[in-house]
Amino acid sequence: AICHSVTHGAPADHARGFGIQGNDGSRTFESVAEANAARGGLRRLEAKRAGIARELETYLSSLINSVGEYFKSRAQTAAVMQQAGLRPTRHVAPNISSISFYRSKTTECAQRLQALSWEIAVRRGNCFSQALGIAVTSYLTSISDGGPGWRGYANTWLRHGYLITFEGLLSAVGKELGMIEDASVAVEMLRMVHVVLVPDDGVSGTVNKNESSCRRIPVPHSPYVRWVHLAHLSKKGSESKSMYRLEIGLNQSYYQSRVPEPLKGGAAVRFFPVLYQMGVDIRQWGVNAGRNVTSQIKERNKVGGVPSAELGDNSDAATEASSDFNGCGLIDDGDDDDEGGVADNEILMALNVEGFRKMNAYAHSVFPTTAGVTAATSPIAAFYPSEHAQLQPLPPHPILSSLSEAIKTSAGKMEHGVLDKSATACQRMGGGSTVFCKSGKDRTAMQVTFKQAQFLQRLMDKKPSTTLEDSQISYDDVFEHATLMRIHGTRVPICEKNAGEAKYAFNPLQAKFMPEMLKPPPITLAGFLKKPET
């Protein structure tokens, strides 16, 4: 595949949900107020866990100090008690109020920390498994005939990792905010995985390998992939650097004839995942509008000499304005409406800046701008965020200059160019891309058909002296081809299979608020009333 995009739903823990209770309905937090503060996806839950851990450390230190003070004061009276013939006690009396208070608080914090840690561990496993399957699909597609693996990028992957860009179309409000938080952590976890392609030796199930049990999971319906095996490589106590080795057993003839030579012989390729996120529906429009109103109120009061602390209810008006769109049922990919929820005005910008920093480091490694440095000798890009923070900031790579400008201007508005330019840059660097919304059928269909139409137009207009990505295209023709694909392509049957109706889950009001390049044809709209679930 010369150009490909994997489409999928959000890699999030949809089954556990994003509320205050688990599947069994049991509460795991101290109070409803605290549970509400912790509700959401992994990104928010892990921040909450870090806060509880700091709280536990504070209470534990206070408990130790209180016990120390108690024994110090008791030592002063020990001699008097011995002279009186009394035997000093060796335990802490239960009626010492300070010790009793800190012991109770320490126990409560420890229980809350353990409960939340277990919730996060289960959630990470559920989200990571989805992201891993998506990334492997993209990687295997990239080594197919005509893919970047056969265009000289296999050696780049071996040294610098396989670049994969996740293009998210979720809104930063309600349930979808929780999905963004889950997906961001799941995508980050892919950095722990090395992929190795091996020829199938005809042995399935459990085999002995280096005196350890190796469980191969068969893939029964694939003509080329026979089995997969995921092994944990890290030593105990090195959680932050946990690594996994994913072996993929391929059909012998396919392996010999279709796998690029650099990827044979046990060569391990590490994933280099990057996430970009941009809401494109009416709920995100409402969030952006509320953010802009808030900024205007603060600016007006600042000019008028009114301190920000005195804004009072005025600053909440913007939140109320944006929340009017949260639960209106205007778009939810055919599922139940969101119950509202607090919007996060900053997470999209934070994720896109973080994604750009990673991709920029990768670009400087793969296409170094320093004279005399090649991709084979350039430093390897940092794989972990903590490593990025320790490095000096790099200037935007020439390949990413337009993406940098798009991100800078994206605050408070739907800047679809962030997704468009990141996908083009990823293709230019020999990577793979995926597109997702909530369920992967409606907003995803608009984005992937737009990308397909772009590729088709570039392929048709390509001149011998230019690369595919540099081909000048007419966006009128792109929109025309995208419309044909949206009406007559494979995306409408996917909607029919999913929801029982050959229509996209949009109505005319929604379409008005979507970016121009993602607006669906009127004939494909489902209308204002949703059909019952099927």
Image: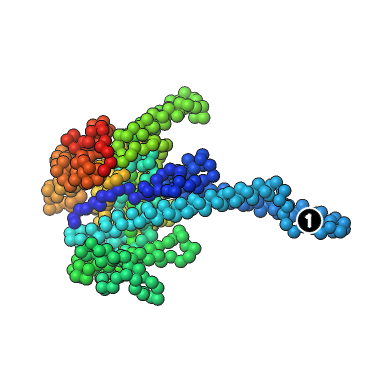
For the C terminus, the image quarter is top left
Name the residue tied to disc 1.
75
Rendering coords of residue 427 (x, y %): 24, 52
> What residue is rendered at 39% in x and 44% in y?
178
Rendering coords of residue 519 (x, y %): 22, 37
Q: Quadrant of residue 272?
A: bottom left
Residue 391, compared with residue 295, is above or below; it is below
* Mark 1 element type: helix
Q: Quadrant of residue 217?
A: bottom left
Q: How is the image coloured?
A: rainbow
Residue 122, compared with residue 335, is above or below; it is below
Q: Nearer the viewer, residue 372 or 328?
A: 328
Q: Nearer the viewer, residue 28 or 90?
A: 28
Query: Can you see residue 411?
Result: no
> What residue is rendered at 45% in x and 46% in y?
25
Rendering coords of residue 113 (x, y %): 53, 51
Query: Can you see residue 30?
Result: yes
Instruction: Using residue 331 as the reference point, say whether residue 103 is left or right of it.
Output: right
The amino acid type, in three-letter code, at marker 1 is Ala
Q: Quadrant of residue 476?
A: top left
Rendering coords of residue 313 (x, y %): 47, 26
